[in-house]
């Protein structure tokens, strides 16, 4: 089910255990059941309703919040998801309730000292799309820098650098203005942009993610969130 993009592996286990999965019309409730590669897999009406009830939210993360698990002196970004911080410009008809916080996890990281678009979701399909092993979803950043760029630095930022002994995928890096670069990446190693810049003589003084796939940060205010729209897809 995960391989076909129907849900995450963890979600698949829950659906199977609850008897919400049918294979070629037969209800399956035992984990590890073997099926043929071309078998037809379906969720029951109840399973589909559960899946449709899952939420994904877009947060403009401010500095000082960590993306995932809380760290000493820092709060997790999910603490910002509540009724009071919902953006008044959100057009989604969904009503916020505390049950939507259960299983709400970040799809990708954004450093504690970085800002911008962070996706938190209950839906494993969305997480896999953004951060799965085969994900090719581009992420766009505005990066303010100081220092002197090496002669071939811009070329290396686009392609030619390595981190942790592995070559980085090609990126698209251009000057936005005299002290700001625009990065478009298709991978997300830990502190990747900051480390890339250090390799070519630059120091990052500000980093903001403005896009993931087809979804833009737009004018969502810092510290506020909105639901992913029904017509939005990464």
Image (tube, rainbow, N blue to C red):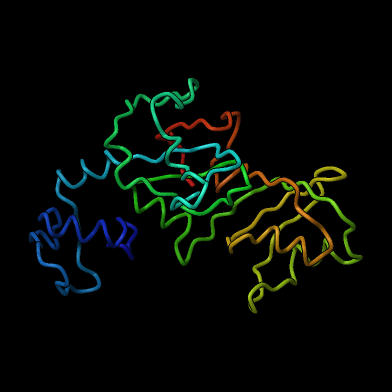
Give percent across and percent down for residue 9.
29, 62
* Quarter-of-image position of residue 45: top left
Task: Identify the residue at image location x=75%, y=52%.
Answer: 204
- Furthest residue to the bottom? 165
| Near-viewer residue (190 or 151) | 190
Residue 162 located left or right of residue 48:
right
Give percent across and percent down for residue 59.
50, 37
Does 24 sit above or below residue 230? Answer: below
Task: Identify the residue at image location x=18%, y=52%.
Answer: 43
Give percent across and percent down for residue 91.
44, 23
The quadrant in which the N terminus is found is bottom left
Residue 135 located left or right of residue 188:
left
Residue 130 located left or right of residue 2:
right
| Near-viewer residue (152 or 189) | 189
Task: Identify the residue at image location x=46%, y=43%.
Answer: 233
Task: Identify the residue at image location x=39%, y=41%.
Answer: 56
For the image, the number of numbered tags is 0
Give percent across and percent down for residue 116.
60, 41
| Near-viewer residue (105 or 134) | 105
* Quarter-of-image position of residue 79: top left
- Furthest residue to the front? 73
């Amino acid at each position: 089910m995960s391989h076909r993009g129907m849900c995450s592996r963890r979600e698949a286990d829950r659906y199977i255990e609850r008897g919400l999965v049918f294979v070629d019309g037969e209800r399956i409730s035992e984990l590890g059941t073997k099926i043929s590669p071309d078998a037809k897999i379906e969720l029951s009406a109840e399973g589909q309703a559960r899946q449709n009830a899952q939420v994904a939210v877009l947060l403009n993360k401010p500095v000082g919040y960590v993306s995932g698990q809380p760290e000493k002196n820092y709060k997790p970004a999910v603490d910002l998801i509540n009724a009071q911080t919902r953006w008044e410009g959100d057009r989604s008809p969904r009503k916020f309730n505390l049950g939507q916080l259960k299983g709400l996890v970040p799809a990708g990281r954004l450093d504690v000292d970085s800002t911008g678009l962070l996706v938190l979701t209950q839906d494993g399909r969305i997480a896999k799309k953004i951060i799965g092993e085969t994900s090719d979803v581009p992420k766009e950043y505005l990066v303010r820098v100081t220092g002197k760029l090496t002669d071939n630095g811009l070329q290396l930022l686009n392609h030619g650098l390595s981190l942790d002994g592995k070559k980085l995928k090609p990126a698209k890096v251009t000057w936005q203005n005299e002290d700001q670069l625009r990065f478009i990446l298709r991978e997300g190693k830990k502190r990747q942009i900051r480390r890339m810049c250090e390799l070519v003589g630059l120091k990052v003084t500000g980093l903001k993610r403005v896009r993931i796939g087809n979804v833009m940060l737009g004018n969502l205010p810092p510290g506020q969130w909105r639901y992913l729209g029904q017509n939005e897809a990464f």
